[in-house]
Amino acid sequence: MKIKHIAFAFTLAALACGCNEDNFLDIRPSATLSDENLSNGENVDLLITAAYSALMGAPGETGSIQTMPMTNWSYGEVRADNAYKGGGGTGDVQDIHRLEIFDVDATLGNVDGKWFNLYSCVARCNSALKVLNNVSAEDYPEVEIRKAEMKVLRAHFYFELSRLFNRIPYFDENVEMDEYPNIPNDAYTRDEILGMLAQELADAAELLPEKQSEIGRVNKNVAYAYEAKVKLYQAYEQDENTHRVININKDLLREVVELCNRLDGKYDLLSDFQQLDLVAYENGVESVFAVQYSMNDGSPSGGRINWSNLLNTPQGPYSGDGFFLPSQDLVNAYQTDADGLPLFDTYNNQNYDWMDNVDDDATYHFRTDVTVDPRLDFVVGRPGITWKTYPDAPYSSSWVRDRGAYGFHSRKRFLVSPESSDMYQGWPWGASGLNWQIIRYADVLLWKAEALIEIGDGASLEEARDIINRIRNRAKTSAYVKDFTDPTKDAANYNIGLYPAAGWTQDYARRALRFETRLEKAMEGERFFDLVRWGIAAETMNTYIGKEKDTRVYYSIADFTQGRDEYLPISRPQYNFSNGNYVQNPGYGDF
């Protein structure tokens, strides 16, 4: 059976992807099975595996997962002030270019495809739950735990839909496919959807064990952490028409703090920031919830690798497509003052680095009169600067395909070093088995600090300062990038300090938290959603566009419209699928 749009045609031939050969996802079923012959304990695992593999999205080589990534690099970073689209110019994957300049309407194929892909993921969870509801504990002792796992995964996919599309239809496993077109997308508000997801995560946590025997399975702590994230978003109550933040719910924020506290002592920060991009540490102390990838596992094209990021490998020794490049604004944000603290108001007054000729690395310059946070060279590739542990040459501007459009920086995160045995040689370029962290413990700490700051009493503010300093201290004590020609010297004048108690008011703490979130989480797909949650997306993005259009010609027609661009439109194909039941998001006009 094939149902168009949000309905899901379940074929097991495409389900065993995005999994690690050493854990429970290493199941490679084939053929198409019905609910009737799956409704026993042995076969229901196939459906559960399918739901987990949905975390990596559509099959990699279809292309849709590369242009509609599960890692949200285009939706959460290119739409924000952290990144440019990159690639071979503005016409290369033009749908993402249109996302970058906010030239988006209900006909954009990327919008329709992302909606479809995420609802396909929801459908995998519902397919598993529908069968699990008819399996007895006698036949399948783990039935209640597996139900809870599926509900956490479903909540994850619905949360992604909510923060991308705002007005979404919600349905569970008890709704038949032929009813889908009749479900309106405005039956619940944004805040009601988030409340329902938080409750489902809370209910799942009651049933889940604290530890699972197989790496990658959802456990109790994953549910707690995700519930904290959902409630943090829910706490920032939005006007339904303007998307402005109209209230911050402190009761929900107290619940966020309590949920984050439940992870205390169970996770920690890795000792070195750069360990986040090493396969050896991917399931380490900082990993709360991760997509399990693998390489050379017998599946085609390198293995079950992260196809969402495959466009984003730079050229040079990787020979990649060169999408997803750090913005100059992000580079400038890593500048620090004499005390090693961020320059909140003035960081973008002068560029940290520049080139007289983007085709000649000898003309690269960077400021020597200021210091920078060491995370700059953990996150960004700069000409002449050591690239990870690559011994043959430093990073070069030639690694960028269209330097005239996008400048001379590349993204260092989420790649292993090109000489590493963990990198796949050949196509897919730059692939590895490195996991994708959906939630890492630094996230949990930042959520807690944010909630404490918005609660705003003296003890809460001081606790938040300690948390932010803990994250900054990890960066401070990490091994700094060394000069390529003289490894006894640092590659730049690094200086990162800790926030003192003096002057730590709520307003200052809020600014520190938001800046720290940007620096720590840069390029992880969250920045745009943070700006919308905080209610500062329009202000931030129009300031950014105003500065960028002086050097990025394509920004000359860009504009962020308050009350529209916080969310993507409901696509016209989905409206047609609903037989006219869907309503459009504010600002996009009629279908």
Image (cartoon, helix red, strand yellow):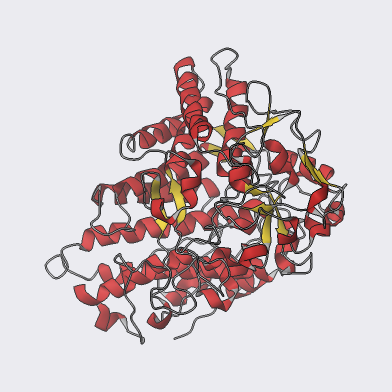
Please indicate, yes or no, whether residue 239 appears anywhere in the rendered image: no
- Residue depicted at 55% across the width and 70% down the height: 116
The quarter in which the C terminus is drawn is: bottom right
Q: Nearer the viewer, residue 404 or 440?
A: 404
Count the numbered circles shown. 0
Seen at 75% across and 32% down, the residue is 368
**Residue in the foreground of this view, choosing between 128 and 515:** 515
Q: Nearer the viewer, residue 391 or 191?
A: 391
Residue 14 to residue 250: above or below? below
Which residue occupies 66% across, 40% down?
A: 244
Q: Position of residue 402 (x, y in %)?
A: 78, 62
Name the residue rendered at 37%, 71% in the picture: 50
Task: Reply above or below: 528 against 149.
Answer: above
Task: Return the x and y of residue 572 as percentages of the image width and height.
Answer: 67, 70
Q: Position of residue 91 (x, y in %)?
A: 79, 69
Image quadrant occupied by the N terminus: bottom left
Q: Residue furthest top?
A: 502
